[in-house]
Image (cartoon, coloured by chain):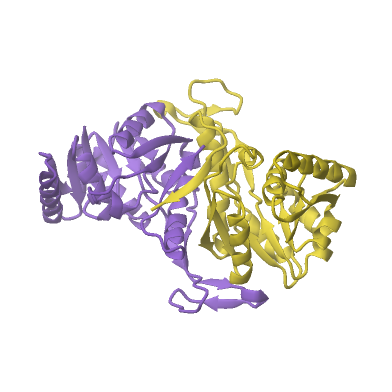
Chain colours: A yellow, B purple
Amino acid sequence: MKIALIGGTGSIGKGFALRWGQKHQIIVGSRGEEKAQAKAAEYTGILKDYGYDANITGSVNSKAASEADIVLLAIRYGQIASTIEQIKPGLAGKIVISVVVPMEKDRCIIVPDGVPLEISTNSREDYQADYFCYVTPPSGSAAQEISPMLPEGTELVSAFHNVPAAKLANLDIELNYDIGVCGNSMHSKNIVFDLVRDICGMRPLDIGPLEASAMVESITPLLVNVAIRNHMKDVGIKFVD
Amino acid sequence: MKIALIGGTGSIGKGFALRWGQKHQIIVGSRGEEKAQAKAAEYTGILKDYGYDANITGSVNSKAASEADIVLLAIRYGQIASTIEQIKPGLAGKIVISVVVPMEKDRCIIVPDGVPLEISTNSREDYQADYFCYVTPPSGSAAQEISPMLPEGTELVSAFHNVPAAKLANLDIELNYDIGVCGNSMHSKNIVFDLVRDICGMRPLDIGPLEASAMVESITPLLVNVAIRNHMKDVGIKFVD
C-alpha cells in the first residue's frame, strides 16, 4: 500500500514512517520538497539500521497525496483548511485518516480552600493548575470539520489520536496501545483496522461513526495532563474488560 | 470515615458500598427510607459472606448527607438540581464526589460508500451505527454544573466516572483501573486519592482542576461504545507509559 503522510516531517509523521515503512511504501509530504526528501532519507536510514530495506520518498504535500492510496493528515488543527485546499485534487476516491486534535493550553482559575485564585500557566505555586484542554470545534470534532471539505467519494477515518509520538518513533520500544477508530464506512474502517494491526502492539477498536470522534480526540489532552501531573511520560491508553 | 452514597441503591452505589464498606462506615441514601434500609441490609449481608463485619445503614438522601463526612453523588445527570436541593443543608464544609456523566444514546446518520443513510438505534443493518455520546452541559461538564449549586466551603471532586458498575459490585473480580480525579483543592483531592487506593486495583491519577472534568466524563460513553462494538463487556481504562 502507498501511504502519504501529509505534514509527515513532524514528530508523529516520523513514527508512522518508521512503523509502516517496514511493510508499506511511504511518501513523506511537506510544504517544502527538500525538507520532505531529507526526512525521507533520514527515516530510510533509521530503518536500514534495523534491517529494513524501506521504500520512503519525499514530496510536496499535494504530490504526496495524489500518488498515494491512503492519505494520513499529520497536521495541526489550525492547518486543516489550507492543507486540504492544497491536496484536495488528489484525494478523490481515497481513504483519508485524521489524527488531528484541537487542543490548547489554558490558564485557569482554581479555588483552593474556597478562595478563587487565578493561576497562570507559568506559575510555580504548589498547586500547578496548568492543563491542556480539548477545544470542541463548531461541528463537534476535528473529523467532522474535515469531512465536508473532502471531495465526493473520499472516505474519512478518524484514528491514532492517542498515540505518543516519541514512543511511536522509537523502534526500541514495544508498544501496547488501543486505537479507537471512527468512521462512516465499514470498507474504509476495515482497511484502517489492518493498518493499526500492521503496527506491532496496537489493537484497533471500533468506536462508532465520525460523530463519535470528539470522545476519542479529547483523550489526547487528557493524556498530556495525566503525564504532566503524575510524573509519567508519553502516556497512551488501554481499554480493559 | 463516614461515606454517604446519594442514590446509593442503584448499581454503581452497590459497588461503592461493597468496596468501601470493607473499611469505612457507609450510609446508603435514597429517596425512600425503606428502600435504602433494605439495600443497606443486602450489602451488609454480601460483605458478611466475604468475612467483613460492615457498618452499612440506610437513610433518605438528606439525612445520609448530613450525617456523613464524604458525600458521593451516584445519581443521573437529570437528577442533579432536585437532589442537591434536598441534600444541600447537610453539605457545608464537606467533600462531595461527583461520578455524574451526561450521556445519551443517539440516532445517527452514516455514509457507507458515500451515500448518506439514517439508521435508527434499533436498526439491524450490517453497520450497527447506534452509539452513546457525551452531551456537554452549558457550563462544560457535570462537575461544573454541580459546583455552583453547593454551599460555600464545600469541596467538589470529580472522579470514578469510568468504572463499570457490574465489576465494581462483583467482589470476585480483581479490578485493574485508573481513576482520573479533577478538583480545585489539593486537600480534598488527596482525601479522594486515598479513597481510590482503598479499593484494591485502582490507581488515582490527577487530571487537573474541575474545568478538566469533561475530558474524563466523556470517556464513559466512549467505554460503552467500545464494549458494544467490539464484543467486550464492562470496559474500563488504563493509562500506560
Left or right? Give the position of A79 relative to B103: right
B127 or B7: nearer the eye? B127
In the picture, residue A87 is in which quadrant?
Answer: bottom right
Q: Does the image show residue A6?
A: yes
Is residue A139 visible from the viewing direction of this image?
no
Q: Position of residue A233 (x, y in %)?
A: 55, 33
Is A48 drawn above or below residue A136 in the view shown?
Answer: above
Q: Quadrant of residue B35?
A: bottom left
Lateral position of residue B48 relative to residue B97, left or right: left
> In the image shown, does A156 or B62 lie closer to the viewer?
A156
Point 84% across, 45% down: residue? A36
Q: Position of residue A196 (x, y in %)?
A: 60, 55
Residue that protrudes farthest toward the front in the picture:
A51
Location of residue A143 with respect to A152 vertically, above or below: above
- In this rendering, the count of numbered labels is 0
Residue at left 72%, top 68%?
A: A154
Measured as percent of width and height from the top left, residue B197 is found at 32, 34
Q: Is residue B216 above or below residue B206?
A: below
Q: Please identify the quadrant where the N terminus of chain B is shown.
A: top left
Q: Is residue A158 left or right of residue A63?
A: left
Task: Between residue B175 and residue A229, name the one nearer to us.
Answer: B175
Residue B160 x %, y %: 36, 44
